Amino acid sequence: MASAIFLFGLAFGSFLNVCIYRLPLGLSVVSPRSACPECKQPIGSYDNIPVLSWLILVGRCRHCKTRISARYLMIELLTGLLFLACYWHFGLNLSTLKYCTLAFLLLGLIFTDAETKLLPDKMTLPGLALGVTFSLFVPVNDLASQFLPGVVNLPVSGDVSARLLSLVDSLLGAAVGASFIYGAGAIYLRWRGAEGMGFGDVKLMAMVGAFLGIKLTIFTIFTASLAGSFFGLTTVFIVWMKRTRRFMKRLADAPAARRRGWQSAQMVYRNYQMPFGVFLGSMALIALFFGNRFLRWYGGFF
């Protein structure tokens, strides 16, 4: 069963590559058939086998020998491994289907944002709808499910009541995730006079909230902010070091070279558009597998 799920993940990873390439361009993911972007030759079914085809062709087009990015191989393997991890973590049930769906969407959005700085609505909005729908069948079991039963008595059976409370948890998670990112973006816009986060990030966090609920959504935002800040500071430091070394060759004065290097680093900081969806998606994947364990550990201190 594990092998079957892994192979299933490889196949979905192959389709995800199509989505990552075509959706930012506004193209259909169904037709036409996949073709080499250089020579336009359609890719035969024997060259479209996940992982194996890339290895057999040594990462090149069969016809024109143009190099095929290793990203295709990486995404197929990552999707297969994520599907396998969901199976090992949740077992053979609807939870695995739910979280395989989330992992598939998050992986696609991470790579799309990294390459194009876009988070396509055709992934985030269906993902939001799927997250809300799944909550009726796989309990989100968040704040509403834990605290409302002792406060509100619904005139329905226990099973229906649990499903409705899970739905409320999903909707609250979507609302909190979207509102937090929207609010942070609005504050940044007023402070800096430039857009810090787009509506793609808002929709991404609405989707994550619908799947994971409020607690893990907050965990995702907090850890993504830390990871993004660390990445930004590291980038600024590296730019400062490189520019300082470059100016040292031109200027005899070391302090002047450092000042010029710092000015260049500040320029990069102001103008660089960080793909924050990469960090939100990555931390949502971590929250999916380890978030509840971390929250239980953290809660043990209080």
Image: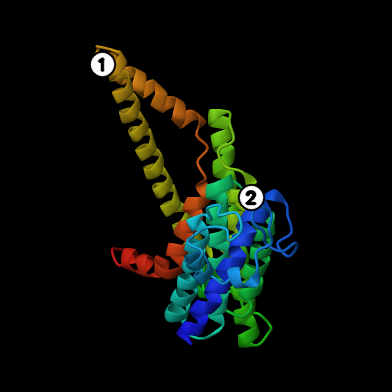
Quarter in which the C terminus is drawn = bottom left
Residue 223, relative to residue 252: is it above or below? below
Mark 1 residue type: Pro
Determine the residue positioned at 55% across, 48% down. 115
Mark 2 residue type: Glu
Determine the residue positioned at 46% across, 77% down. 84
Query: Within the image, what quadrant is residue 300 found in?
Result: bottom left
Question: How does the figure colour the protein chain or chains?
Answer: rainbow
- Given residues 258 and 14, the one toward you in this image is 14
x, y (%) of residue 89? 43, 78
Element carrying mark 1:
helix
Query: Cβ–Cβ below 8 Å for labels 1 and 2?
Result: no
Determine the residue positioned at 46% across, 57% down. 282
Query: Within the image, what quadrant is residue 44 found in?
Result: bottom right
Residue 37 appears left or right of 79: right
Q: Is residue 45 visible?
A: yes
Residue 10, relative to residue 22: is it above or below? below
Determine the residue positioned at 52% across, 45% down. 275
Q: Is residue 175 visible?
A: no
Count residues near mark 2 (Cα–Cα under 10 Å), then give few for <14, some for 14-19, many for 20+: few
- Given residues 25 and 167, the one toward you in this image is 25
- Given residues 208 and 84, the one toward you in this image is 84
Any mark on residue 267, and which? none
x, y (%) of residue 65? 55, 54
- Given residues 65 and 186, the one toward you in this image is 65
Disc 1 versus disc 2: distance between alpha carbons?
49 Å
Residue bearing mark 1: 255
Residue 160 appears left or right of 92: right
x, y (%) of residue 58? 47, 61
x, y (%) of residue 47? 59, 68
Residue bearing mark 2: 38
Question: Which one is closest to the eye, mark 1 or mark 2?
Answer: 2
